[in-house]
Image (cartoon, rainbow, N blue to C red):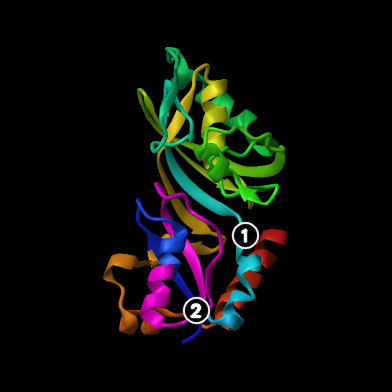
């Protein structure tokens, strides 16, 4: 059993929980995913099964990703999402809806982003979330990321729904905080869903709750087929 399988991760579990479940089903140790999702987030994970397939993880991880998110304005949390504790409350201006288009337009393109303290980035060999859990704030370097698109979906105070396609390494939690700041308030994500990784859609993904060995075997796609799809996608983007 080797190749690529698409999983629709549910909320409340880590990306590594998905890997552990698939290892248990397949009895294969060499399994990895191309791009972590936060525990509260849902959506597409590309999972590579077998030593041959995992060699291509980085190529999949380089692909742009599309997310839908719900941003709650007026409350800032220490994790920038619903799982954290509220550390700041701020009034929400009345003109939020009138300013959304301008704020979204100003957020497009290459930007400098500060990753959240609660993230898997390593600093001096230690993941940031481990030091953050101890109440220790670590200086995090700015990283350049690219916001390809940012679309307004709905606003019903205090919740702002949006969709965004971004480059590798972009934190939607940080993007949400930046959007809230430009709107004159603070905010945190209450929902986050990854809809696409490159050309691959979550609509074609398996729910982990329904999976067994037979379903998995019938759903695994050959690595050669997936790589061909990635190459075709890149060619279309560059033409």
Return the x and y of residue 207 as percentages of the image width and height.
33, 65
Return the x and y of residue 155 as percentages of the image width and height.
38, 28
Q: Residue furthest bottom?
A: 1
From what the image shows, is residue 167 above or below residue 69?
Answer: below
* Rendered image quadrant of residue 205: bottom left
Helix, strand or loop at mark 1: loop
Helix, strand or loop at mark 2: loop
**Separation of disc 1 and disc 2 at Cα?**
25 Å
Residue at 52% from the left image edge and 56% from the top image edge: 36
Residue at 46% from the left image edge and 49% from the top image edge: 38
From what the image shows, is residue 92 above or below residue 103?
Answer: above
Start-end of magenta stretch? 20-49
* Rendered image quadrant of residue 44: bottom left
Residue at 67% from the left image edge and 44% from the top image edge: 146
Q: In the shown orientation, is residue 82 left or right of residue 116?
A: left
Q: Where is the C terminus found, in terms of image quarters? A: bottom right
């Amino acid at each position: 059993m080797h190749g690529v399988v698409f999983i629709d991760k549910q909320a409340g579990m880590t990306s590594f929980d998905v890997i552990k479940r698939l290892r248990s089903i397949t009895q294969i140790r060499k399994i990895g995913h191309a791009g972590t999702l936060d525990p509260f987030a849902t959506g597409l994970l590309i999972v590579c099964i077998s030593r041959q397939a995992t060699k291509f993880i980085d190529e999949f991880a380089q692909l742009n990703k599309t997310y839908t998110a719900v941003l709650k304005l007026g409350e800032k949390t220490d994790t920038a999402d619903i799982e954290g504790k509220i550390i700041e409350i701020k009034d929400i201006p009345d003109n939020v809806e009138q300013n959304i288009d301008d704020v979204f337009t100003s957020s497009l393109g290459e930007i400098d982003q500060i990753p959240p303290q609660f993230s898997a980035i390593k600093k001096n060999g230690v993941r940031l979330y481990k030091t953050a859990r101890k109440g220790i704030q670590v200086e995090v370097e700015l990283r350049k990321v690219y916001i390809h698109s940012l679309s307004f979906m709905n606003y019903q105070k205090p919740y702002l729904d949006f969709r965004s396609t971004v480059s590798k390494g972009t934190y939607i939690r940080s993007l949400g905080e930046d959007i809230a700041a430009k709107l004159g308030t603070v905010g945190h994500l209450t929902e986050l869903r990854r809809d696409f990784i490159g050309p691959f859609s979550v609509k074609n993904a398996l729910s982990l709750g329904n999976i067994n060995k037979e379903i998995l075997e019938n759903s695994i796609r050959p690595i050669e087929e997936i790589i061909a799809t990635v190459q075709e996608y890149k060619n279309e983007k560059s033409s």
